[in-house]
């Protein structure tokens, strides 16, 4: 999948250029890659330790608190129900239930033995929470009108996930590799991403809010999804949590006021049907009928690479400003802690991180 990063850098973007240089150094430099790999291995080990108690839930709880405080986009005025896709360990849901005592929530997540996390909502909030266990990417979530009858081996989506019904939808499903397993493949990531988008767009109420976790603002796939969110919502902003997501490419996109007028509603439903067709191809397409990888052309119905390059770069820079800055500064700190300067040096890293930290703490 192509990236728009070279075009953005060519048009002048020092933060993204420095970030791309550090990525190249981390992945291609023989003197850097081993210790950087060890750093992320230790990070994953620490996460596994935190999973066994409430620490990992608190990471997500505080992350949602910072997102809400920083973006000022939550909650919708009419919030009564929310859906949390990929809810475990439960930090996001716990924040909503604790902060808004009249709100009820529904969650779905993988069982722990299949790569999910344990649920740690807490008994005080559990009576307002409906939990479903399952792999969202292996439900029969859709069938385009032109497709044959769905296979019998996929269960139907549980009833609470029907059209509309939720003023807030959180999409943060991911599968963590179990001991001895390889990392999630790009094909699995794309299927799960399409599954989440379909369920989220089907379930969110008109005027509601959707929060989705994405990777790499400049990736074509991600840029196309951001373009779609701009089309169907009143406002779309991004947020990247310094403490939880810092050195990775992961960030949140928050779209508010979804489907408020006839045009955005029509666009939403048109895109939804095309997304279902893409999901079907990823699940049952390919030469052997066992699914295939996402192609660059699959999301051209939203927007293609050339149109993004011609009309959307300024907007993409705006959406990428915080995610790129946080990631660049977090990587600078990692390089500094290992005794390397990175692109702009240790002092710049400390100053950038302190600035971001103060910004998040003061809002």
Image (cartoon, grey):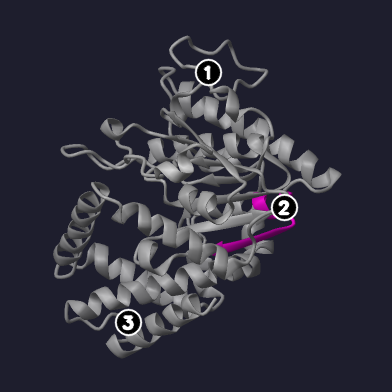
Furthest residue to the right?
262
What whole-number distance in Å separates the C-alpha atoms at marks 1 and 2? Answer: 29 Å
**Which type of secondary structure does the marked residue at label 2 adopt?**
loop
Q: Position of residue 16 (x, y in %)?
A: 45, 73
Decide if residue 359 is on the left or right side of residue 110. Answer: right
Q: Nearer the viewer, residue 280 or 338?
A: 338
Question: Of the residues under marks 1 and 2, which one precedes in the sequence?
Answer: 1
Q: Can see residue 205?
A: yes
Which mark lies nearer to you, 2 or 3?
A: 2
Q: Is residue 60 above or below residue 247?
A: above
Q: Position of residue 23 (x, y in %)?
A: 32, 67
What whole-number distance in Å separates the C-alpha atoms at marks 2 and 3? Answer: 37 Å
Which mark lies nearer to you, 1 or 2?
A: 1
Q: Position of residue 262 (x, y in %)?
A: 85, 43
Decide if residue 118 is on the left or right side of residue 169. Answer: left
Q: Residues within 10 Å of mark 3 (few under 14, many from 20)?
A: some
**Which type of secondary structure does the marked residue at label 1 adopt?**
loop
Q: Are marks 1 and 3 in contact (CB under 8 Å)?
A: no
Question: Of the residues under marks 1 and 3, which one precedes in the sequence?
Answer: 1
Query: What's the residue at 54%, 13% (across, down)?
Result: 150
Point out the stretch of residues depicted in magenta: 228-238
Q: Which mark is residue 233?
A: 2
Q: Can see residue 220?
A: no
Say which residue label 1 marks. 156
Question: Of the residues under marks 2 and 3, which one precedes in the sequence?
Answer: 2
Say which residue label 3 marks. 343
Q: Is residue 171 magenta?
A: no
Q: Position of residue 321 (x, y in %)?
A: 53, 72
What whole-number distance in Å separates the C-alpha atoms at marks 1 and 3? Answer: 51 Å
Q: Which mark is residue 223?
A: none
**Which type of secondary structure does the marked residue at label 3 adopt?**
loop
């Amino acid at each position: 999948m192509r990236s728009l990063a070279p075009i953005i850098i060519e048009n002048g973007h020092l933060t993204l250029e420095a970030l791309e240089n550090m990525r190249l150094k981390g992945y291609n430099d023989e003197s850097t890659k081993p210790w950087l790999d060890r750093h992320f291995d230790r990070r994953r080990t620490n996460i596994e330790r935190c999973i066994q108690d409430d620490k990992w839930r608190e990471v997500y709880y505080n992350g949602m608190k910072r997102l809400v405080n920083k973006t000022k986009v939550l909650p919708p005025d009419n919030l009564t129900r929310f859906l949390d896709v990929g809810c475990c360990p439960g930090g996001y849901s716990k924040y909503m239930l604790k902060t808004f005592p009249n709100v009820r929530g529904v969650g779905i997540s993988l069982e722990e033995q299949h790569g999910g996390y344990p649920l740690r909502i807490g008994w005080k909030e559990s009576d307002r929470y409906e939990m479903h266990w399952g792999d969202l990417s292996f439900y029969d979530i859709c069938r385009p009108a032109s497709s044959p009858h769905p296979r019998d081996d996929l269960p139907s989506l549980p009833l609470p996930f029907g059209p509309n019904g939720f003023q807030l939808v959180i999409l943060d499903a991911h599968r963590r590799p179990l001991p001895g397993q390889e990392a999630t493949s790009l094909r699995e990531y794309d299927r799960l991403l399409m599954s989440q988008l379909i369920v989220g767009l089907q379930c969110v109420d008109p005027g509601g809010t959707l929060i989705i976790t994405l990777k790499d603002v400049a990736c074509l796939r991600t840029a196309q999804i951001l373009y779609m969110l701009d089309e169907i919502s009143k406002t779309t902003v991004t947020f990247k949590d310094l403490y939880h997501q810092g050195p990775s490419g992961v960030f949140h996109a928050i779209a508010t006021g979804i489907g408020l007028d006839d045009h955005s509603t029509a666009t939403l439903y048109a895109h939804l049907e095309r997304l279902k067709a893409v999901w079907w191809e990823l699940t049952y397409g390919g030469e052997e009928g066992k699914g295939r990888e996402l192609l660059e052309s699959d999301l051209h119905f939203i927007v293609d690479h050339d149109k993004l390059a011609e009309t959307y770069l300024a907007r993409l820079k705006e959406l990428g400003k915080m995610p790129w800055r946080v990631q660049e500064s977090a990587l600078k700190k990692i390089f500094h802690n290992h005794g390397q300067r990175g692109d702009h040096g240790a002092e710049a890293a400390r100053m950038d991180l302190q600035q971001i930290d103060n910004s998040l703490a003061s809002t």
